[in-house]
Image (cartoon, rainbow, N blue to C red):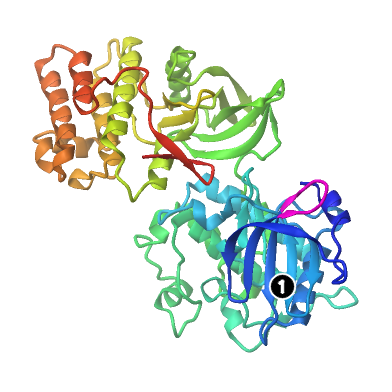
Amino acid sequence: MSVASTSSQMSEETTNPTKYSIISQIGKGGYSTVHLVLLANDAQDMVVLKKTELTAKAKADDLENEYKLHKSLMVNGGHENIIKIFEMNRGPKVYEFFLEYAREGPISSIFDNKGLPTTIARFYFRQLINGLKYIHDHGITHRDIKPTNLLLDKDDNLKICDFGLATSYRDADGKNIPVVGHTGTPPYAAPEVFSKDLVNGPATDVWSAGIVLVELLTGSRPWARASLKKCVQYSDWVNNITCLDERPWSLMDFNSYNFIRLILAPMATKRASIKSIMAHKCHDVGVRRGDLLDNMWYVSRPLGLGAYGQTYTARCKYSLFREDVIKIQKPSKDYNREILTGGKMSGIPGFPRFFGSFHFKEYMCIAMSHEGEPLATVLRRCAKEKMHSWNVATIGYRLFKLIHVLHENEIVHRDLHSSNVLVKQTEDGKLHLSIIDFGKASILSGNPFDPVDDYISAVLILFRLRNEDPLGILFERYLETKKTFRKNPVEYISAPENKWLGHLYQTLENQRNAKNGIKLTELLDAFRAVHPGLNDETPIYYSKKNWKLVIH
């Protein structure tokens, strides 16, 4: 949407209000409702309308100030990490703000109670800090940074929104001045905010950003309130007796913990500044959006952490409509293993196509085709539902056939789990499965690795699809869990309708013990018993929810 074209057709005068039609309500607060609307202009722009009713607590002067401060950040097109505000309608009882539409909604919608991979958490945190720097450079402090005020657009750009508590921290001469504390949301507010003293506005924003980083990394807030008297967890933090074996600290690496120590310094004067955060090594995720790698690929966004590297989506400059993946890692034997084994499978259906390898700074990079999103991500989206047995059988059937192809090429994967199985909707509307990440793979010839383990890992993935969790299995990759389960798998299946998975597991163990190799036909027949007529063309049934894939 063009800001210029939208702004030119909007009027902030009450006598000539902007006209629109409401599509749907997408949010509601204490005094406001938020709608997705279509403007009655030539372009028919889709924007967000925030309607606020005037009350004793939602005063016209406050709304005028919010609009003024937010609008001042739109000079020269604004900033990519600040939600755009276009115009305002004034009414005797209601104020209407017209804002940029960030389709993916609050950042809190993308992480669960275990948080995000470190690379992705830092990626979003870096955008938050970039946005705060822009706000502070304009003499404004936000004073209510929290996940619900951080939105994501369709391209994974983080957007800071809601300037209802924002204020200027510079006087008419441009000198920094303290601001009134006692604002914001308690779990994200700096300790000095709870005093009656004036505070350093930017330092309170830094603190709030630090709490957001903890939540991005772990899925949890560290405390309910930064108060020595009212919160034991915060008191432990101040006295440096925080237990690193307890949540949320146990869910982050030590470098991240030390980084957060600098940001969440109780004394504002000792707290990390925006400048020092941007210079810190933990703030650097290696590459940045728009970087041109090997004079070939423009970096788009991070995908996450693999076994031995970080992965990013990228667009080839000779084919910008094609999205590829770049895996970046330090030189190692594992890198050479991935080149050898993954390269051997390149071009075979069900495996990524390798486009080449190259150096970037001190890193080695592999360019490959983008095969979709991890099955693990789809699972989290459908966590409360059991996937239908027909779909589970179809996915298992396809996985087993892919594993068979892998073994026919004398490669054993050795790290098959739901994050290394990708799902992609093809042009004909069908779902396509791929196996990725050959960082632990090995050539079978002359090596003592048992290929049956790849099939066993696939069965454990199927257990998760049916919400079965025998022996508390949470991660399919742990060999010790597999060994314990091998003795009598059917016994540990809770639901009768899932017993077939236990029998399938037992069949694999029997084939292992017989030492006559894998009999694929016998294994595929187990899937056909659940889904009669199952073959290579049988579809996986799915739908879309908020533009995202859901497998039923």
Q: Quadrant of the C terminus?
A: top left
Q: Which of the 4 image quarters holds residue 410? A: top left
Front in this rendered view, residue 457 or 459: 459
Tell me the element at label 1.
Answer: loop
Mainly helix, strand or loop, the magenta region?
Answer: loop
Based on the picture, tell me whether residue 256 belongs to the magenta stretch.
Answer: no
Please provide percent x and percent y for residue 391: 32, 32
Based on the picture, tell me whether residue 45 belongs to the magenta stretch.
Answer: yes
Which residues are drawn in magenta?
38-46
Q: Amino acid at mark 1?
A: Ala
Q: Left or right: where does residue 191 sit relative to residue 246?
A: right
Please provide percent x and percent y for residue 546: 53, 46
When the figure is inspected, residue 448 is found, relative to residue 173, above or below; the finding is above
Front in this rendered view, residue 248 or 64: 64
Front in this rendered view, residue 320 or 486: 320
Please provide percent x and percent y for residue 142: 69, 69
When the figure is inspected, residue 471 is found, relative to residue 392, above or below; the finding is below
When the figure is inspected, residue 482 is found, relative to residue 186, above or below; the finding is above
Front in this rendered view, residue 127 or 57: 57
Task: Provide the residue designation for mark 1.
Answer: 166
